[in-house]
Image (cartoon, rainbow, N blue to C red):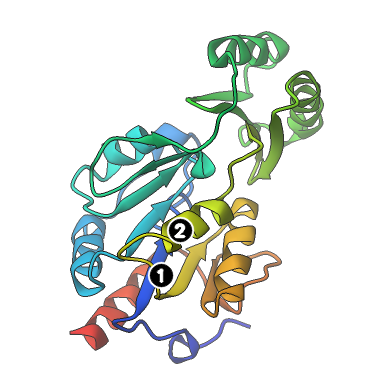
Amino acid sequence: MQPPALSLPALTANTALFLDFDGCLVEIAPRPDAVSVPSGLADRLERLHDALGGAVALISGRDVADLRRYLPGFPGAMAGSHGAELALGGKDITATHDADLDIPALHAAAARAVAAHPAILIERKPHGVALHYRADPSLRAVVEEVMQHLADAHPDMILQPAKMAVELRPAGSGKDGALDRLMAMPPFAGRVPVYAGDDLTDEPAMARAQALGGDGIKIGAGDTVARYRLDDPAALGRWLDEALGGLR
């Protein structure tokens, strides 16, 4: 059962807010490059950033450069590529892992492996690769087999299941680790974390936020460790607007 809005955690002046992007702030699209940013999102994030003293961060599987293309004026921290890179307040990106990997070769190997299945979308990332089978769910087994072979060939990488996709990412990265790194830095340090996300990749971060005395909010359906749930990105947006009213 969907909890009523009043059962959601309150945002206070001592909250550190962490938000996923796809499926959380924006609706999932058939292709990663086809997402539509809601008209009021940029303004909402800027107001949250001001109200929370800068303690608002995006934590996404997308790389930071991609996030900036969709939210170019976002003033807060961004953890991209599942935490493999970090940007603070628009400053330069810092890699947070030491994997010595030939990324172009990885992308090429993935492309060769699925060449016979044009419905599989290859998402080339700066620190890994993802294969999406949303266009033809019957290809899930093909994607899983290909990605397992790639993982076997790259022991410094790990498989990350996602919605209608499988990703290969650096073993030292993860959204929970990104949350921990940010929580050790100003302006997040000493605050109570609240993390909202929709995917399997967000579950460790929601668990970590709750272990630190905060809360997780699951967006959409599915099993979750989170204590709270909202139907979709629009519902999250409404809740954030209500929470902003209480912070003024």
Q: Position of residue 119 (x, y in %)?
A: 63, 23
Answer left or right for 214 relative to 73: right
The amino acid at mark 2 is Cys
Q: Which mark is residue 24?
A: 2
- 175 above or below 197? above
Answer left or right for 66 relative to 153: left
Count neighbours of disc 2 (C-alpha within 10 A) and say few if under 14, some if 14 to 19, many if 20 or more: many
What residue is rendered at 40% in x and 70% in y? 236
Secondary-structure class at tag 1 = helix
Q: Position of residue 167 (x, y in %)?
A: 64, 34
Q: Position of residue 3 (x, y in %)?
A: 55, 85
- Is 159 or 101 nearer to us in this picture? 101
Q: Quadrant of residue 111?
A: top right
Q: Position of residue 85 (x, y in %)?
A: 44, 38
Secondary-structure class at tag 2 = loop
Answer left or right for 155 relative to 32: right
